[in-house]
Image (cartoon, grey):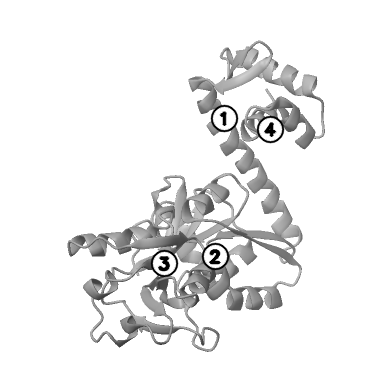
């Protein structure tokens, strides 16, 4: 058994059981990949993949366990390399952040600017998706840090720490009657077509819960994962928007009026997510602390060691 075999098995699984694509990604030959997988199966005494002729069509139950162990092993090997890299070059490397559009667009710019000024030799990349996709990117190793709402706390292999609480607002064209509602109520909102976030976002569940609690059925005519897309269609007067409060900027969104709606909905919490037992380089701790100053290196280490899951804002 060797690391090369584990990499071959992992890549084949990632490529939807397409051995040719896996071989191309690994810069080797298809027969070579197939041979090494067969050798690993023979050594372990189990079949990792279900075969139909020469094609791989599924992963066996023991194969799923082998894949999980292989992924952990390869992550640990990568962490060992990072230890050496950090001591050799503490301020040089790469950092990949997986986050939602709203965080990337409205919260992270200041953090990214300050981080790049402090660590000019670190290559920073942002990957966007819904909270589930964000969690998956970190677990797969595609990203180092997840920044999203509560949904990422549902992953047992992620350690998550709370950063900020936020709530919602109502946006509409300036003459829309909803802006004259004082006080603003869920009943008043439910009278109009609504444009808001897709169901893949945790915050959408809290919106639905609030209406359901009042026996109301909101008329959601359009949903999106992008706050700017929501505002675009609200500006066309296709409905009123229920939006993250952080996504409304009066200096930029001059064509829209806004009412605070934090009294109508439960607050959401933005969280940082890390792979359990991950090795973090010094600049990764720095990025987390720039984003959430209360998350010091010591607090992050305590959480990664398994003692910080119950921390609350």
Instruction: Tell me: residue 45, above or below residue 164.
Output: above
Residue 108, quarter of picture: bottom right
Q: Which residue is mark 1?
A: 67
Label 4: which residue? 7
Q: Nearer the viewer, mark 3 or mark 4?
A: 3
Q: Quadrant of the C terminus?
A: bottom left
Nearer the observer, 66 or 179: 179
Q: Closer to the camera, 110 or 305?
A: 110
Sequence-first tag of 3 and 4: 4
Residue that label 2 marks: 101
Around disc 3, counting alpha carbons within 10 Å, would you say few (fewer than 14), some (14 to 19), or many (20 or more)?
many
Residue under label 3, please give it: 195
Side (left or right) of 32 relative to 15: right
Label 3 or label 1, whichever lies nearer to me, is 3
Question: Eyeballing the image, is 119 above or below 93?
Answer: below
Foreground residue among 14 and 6: 14
Residue 130 in view, yes or no: yes
Under tag 4, what secondary structure?
helix
């Amino acid at each position: 058994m060797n690391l090369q075999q584990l990499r071959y098995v992992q890549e084949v699984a990632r490529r939807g059981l397409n051995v040719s694509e896996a071989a191309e990604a690994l810069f080797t030959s298809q027969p070579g990949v197939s041979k090494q997988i067969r050798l690993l199966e023979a050594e372990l005494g189990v079949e990792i993949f279900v075969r139909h002729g020469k094609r791989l069509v599924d992963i066996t139950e023991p194969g799923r366990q082998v894949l999980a162990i292989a992924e952990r092993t390869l992550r640990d090997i990568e962490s060992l390399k990072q230890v050496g890299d950090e001591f050799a070059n503490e301020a040089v490397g790469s950092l990949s952040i997986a986050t939602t559009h709203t965080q990337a667009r409205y919260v992270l710019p200041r953090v990214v600017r300050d981080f790049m000024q402090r660590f000019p030799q670190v290559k920073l990349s942002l990957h966007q998706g819904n909270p589930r996709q964000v969690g998956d990117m970190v677990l797969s190793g595609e990203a180092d840090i997840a920044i999203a709402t509560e949904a990422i706390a549902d992953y047992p292999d992620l350690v998550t720490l709370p950063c900020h609480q936020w709530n919602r607002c109502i946006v509409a064209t300036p003459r829309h009657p909803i802006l004259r509602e004082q006080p603003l109520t869920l009943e008043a909102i439910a009278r109009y077509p609504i444009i808001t976030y897709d169901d893949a976002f945790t915050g959408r569940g809290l919106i639905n819960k609030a209406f359901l609690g009042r026996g109301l059925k909101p008329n959601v005519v359009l949903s999106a994962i992008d706050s700017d897309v929501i505002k675009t269609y609200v500006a066309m007067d296709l409905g009123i928007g229920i939006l993250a409060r952080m996504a409304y900027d009066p200096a930029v969104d001059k064509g829209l009026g806004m009412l605070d709606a934090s009294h109508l909905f439960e607050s959401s919490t933005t969280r940082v997510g890390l792979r359990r037992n991950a090795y973090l380089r010094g600049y990764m701790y720095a990025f987390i602390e720039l984003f959430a100053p209360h998350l010091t290196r010591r607090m992050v280490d305590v959480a990664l060691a398994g003692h910080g899951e119950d921390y609350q804002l």
